[in-house]
Image (cartoon, rainbow, N blue to C red):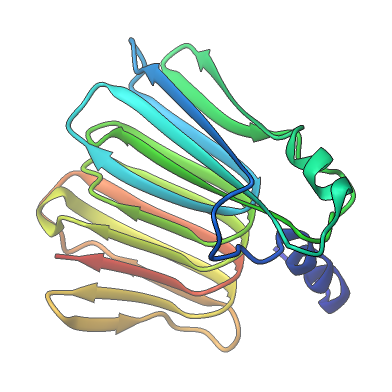
Amino acid sequence: MKLTLSLLSLLLVSAGSVSAAEPNRTLDTDVSLGSATSIEVKVPVGDLTVTGTGGERIKARLEIFCDADAGASCLEAAKKLAVNTRNRGSELLVQVEGYPRISHRGLSANLKVEVPRGVRFEADGGVGDVRISGMNGDVEVGQGVGDVFIQVDKGKVHRVELDTGVGEAVLVIDGGRIEGSGLVSKGLEWTGGKGAALIEVDTGVGDITVELD
């Protein structure tokens, strides 16, 4: 993914900065996995935190923030955000929708998701950081701008593939550190695991860190 400096600046402004204060609006979603064997989460703008659990349900909480000086227009924009789910055969889609097409200063959001740890999981994001922990199945992340951190059980993983256009790619195994190679873009492949899962991350701009414990 190639991004000009001007486009990158626009994307970062669009993401906004999440305040330490309480969210202006919170949306909760709770759905059954049903017959699905994989989950895809799409977040165009905002941070994503994913935690693998032992249940059979997907629980999502969207926290929406407006800066103190953003004004009424930000609150109106916040009302349009929603978390929608859709079953696509063997895959369950969880998607944040309603974000302004034109960047809205002062508006930001975090999505926190709990998912069954054994399913195949995919995250598709635009701008924001991604943190994933506790998953046992395949994990695939495609992120435009933002850092990605994944922490999983080493015994569950067979292969790790990391690729970032601008940033660092790092794999940490039992405290040891393996860094990706490349002048600007960095790539890393590792196939030393005894498990079955594939961890694959591709970012345009941002650091990637995968920890296998």
Q: Residue at x 55, y 79 (%)?
A: 167
**Image quadrant containing the N terminus:** bottom right
Please indicate whether residue 45 sits to the left or right of residue 141 in the image. right
Using the image as rendered, state which of residue 71 and residue 39 is in the foreground: 71
Rendered location of residue 69, percent (x, y): 81, 64
Drawn side of residue 2 relative to residue 145, left or right: right
Q: Is residue 126 above or below residue 38?
A: below
Q: Nearer the viewer, residue 108 or 186?
A: 108
- Residue 141 lies, with reference to residue 154, above or below; the image says above
Q: Position of residue 137 (x, y in %)?
A: 25, 40
Placement of 124 over or under 86, stated as above or below: below
Q: 133 or 167, which is in the foreground?
A: 133
Relative placement, left or right, of 35 versus 16 is left
Q: Quadrant of residue 51?
A: top left
The picture places residue 177, in percent across and down from the top left corner, at: 25, 83
Of 150 and 157, which appears nearest the observer?
A: 150
| Image quadrant containing the C terminus | bottom left
Q: Residue at x 37, y 71 (%)?
A: 209
